[in-house]
């Protein structure tokens, strides 16, 4: 089987690439120039068409969905497989998503369902995966434990970076709208497993928002303005507030270690160690920390972020905010645990820091389930089942 790999600096790319190679597939790489327009870019699509047509690939693969790649594959009548791990992703609302050669696998079931409701029949639900078998080879000796052992750890953005501060662009709305938006944000913070922001966007609120932050739909798009503002502007604000409040709350009582790019002087009792390094360092962090937090970006409505597979696949104990997709594959209190309020988070943090044996047993169960059912081999089997109707190895 001959595959064109659309390469860019994506999460998880080594795992699925290695699985292609393990199966004996011939894999060629096309390096995506992310500086290019990835939507209706006929010139760039033409470059891809020339490459695809000349080489005669069985299918083209990319992490995340790129309309320009879909254009090229549709022109060549070659299957395009995209495995999406980002949320939100406005590119999914490109009209190219309807092209018949697309097979778009989405990690968030709620996002998948939303597209189905829009009449898209080229999308499929597929959670992320990890390479737990590889991590078995990472030796965690006492020296490593001395460096990375922590009571509670979180690896991820605080969403205080300038690029994430989209909500600040709405600061000039009128007082009523500002109060309404703040109320929406506070309400969403208290609700897990469902995104209520978009349904709370009334026509009057949307009209006022549009005055200070006009939104022009993409030329090839069918995205809803209310979807854009709720998922990009407000959900990021909820996440920023939540991560700050959770880390601050926990650090008042326990040791909390944060690995992130941003400085966090306002979190005076949190030990900010900067960004986690190469993948091996993340495995050490997850394996050596007593509790590993997942605080999902709120635009991930029901899905399990890549982080949770890495934590469990590394043998770490996972304590996550509630996400509905977990229940399809894992059992709370057996493979991981979750919380649906700040109060419940504090109670469970206190419990698991004391009950070491139970915590370690849950981490072991989660690891075994990840290794058995959530490898890149498992996921590629599913992908091939979908695109060919039977497994081809």
Image: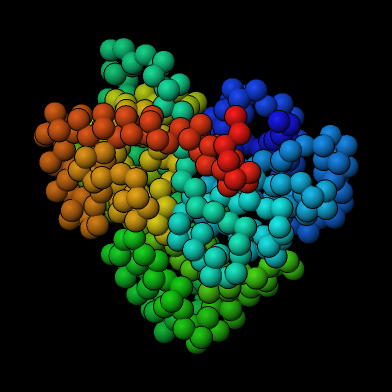
Whether residue 317 sits left or right of residue 277 in the image: it is: left
**24 up-or-down from 157: above or below:** above
Q: Quadrant of residue 14?
A: top right
Do we see residue 80 in this rendering?
A: yes
* Foreground pick, 388 / 283: 388
Q: Residue at x 18, y 53 (%)?
A: 344
Depicted 125 relative to depicted 268: above or below:
below
| Residue 272 seen by the camera | no
Viewer-nearest residue: 192 or 335: 335
Residue in front for this viewpoint, 132 or 224: 132
Q: Is residue 71 left or right of residue 155?
A: right
Q: Position of residue 153 (x, y in %)?
A: 31, 36
The single residue placed furthest to the bottom in the displayed view is 204
**In which quadrant will I find the C terminus?**
top right
Residue drawn at the location 26% of the way across and 41% of the way down: 336
- On the image, the x and y values in percent for residue 241 come to 36, 58
Residue 47, position as x, y percentages in the image: 86, 44
């Amino acid at each position: 089987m001959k595959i064109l790999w659309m390469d860019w600096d994506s999460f998880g790319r080594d795992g699925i690439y290695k699985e292609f190679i393990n199966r004996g597939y011939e894999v060629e790489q096309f390096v995506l120039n992310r500086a290019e327009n990835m939507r209706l870019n006929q010139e760039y699509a033409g470059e891809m068409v020339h490459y695809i047509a000349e080489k005669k690939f069985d299918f083209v693969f990319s992490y995340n969905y790129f309309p320009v790649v879909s254009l090229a594959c549709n022109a060549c009548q070659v299957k395009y497989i995209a495995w999406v791990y980002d949320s939100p992703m406005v590119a999914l609302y490109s009209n190219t998503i309807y092209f018949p050669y697309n097979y778009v696998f989405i990690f968030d079931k709620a996002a998948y369902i939303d597209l189905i409701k829009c009449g898209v029949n080229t999308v499929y639900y597929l959670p992320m995966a990890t390479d737990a078998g590889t991590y078995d080879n990472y030796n965690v000796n006492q020296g490593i434990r001395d460096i990375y052992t922590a009571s509670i750890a979180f690896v991820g953005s605080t969403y205080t970076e300038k690029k994430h501060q989209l909500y600040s662009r709405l600061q000039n709305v009128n007082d009523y709208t500002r109060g309404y938006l703040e109320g929406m944000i506070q309400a969403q913070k208290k609700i897990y497993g469902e995104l209520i922001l978009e349904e709370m966007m009334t026509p009057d609120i949307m009209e006022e928002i549009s005055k200070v932050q006009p939104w022009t739909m993409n030329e090839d798009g069918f995205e809803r303005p209310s979807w854009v503002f709720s998922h990009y502007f407000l959900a990021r604000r909820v996440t920023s507030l939540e991560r700050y409040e959770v880390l601050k709350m926990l650090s008042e009582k326990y040791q909390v270690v944060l690995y992130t790019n941003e400085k966090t002087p306002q979190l005076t009792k949190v030990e900010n160690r900067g960004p986690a390094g190469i993948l091996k360092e993340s495995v050490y962090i997850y394996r050596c920390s007593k509790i590993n937090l997942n605080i999902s970006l709120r635009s991930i409505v029901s899905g399990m972020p890549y982080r949770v597979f890495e934590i469990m696949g590394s043998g770490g104990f996972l304590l996550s905010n509630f996400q509905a997709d977990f229940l399809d594959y894992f059992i709370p209190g057996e493979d991981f645990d979750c919380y649906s309020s700040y109060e419940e988070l504090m109670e469970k943090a206190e419990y698991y820091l004391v009950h070491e044996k139970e915590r370690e047993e849950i981490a072991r169960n989660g690891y075994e389930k990840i290794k058995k059912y959530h490898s890149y081999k498992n996921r590629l089997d599913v992908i091939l089942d979908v695109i060919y109707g039977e497994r081809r190895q």
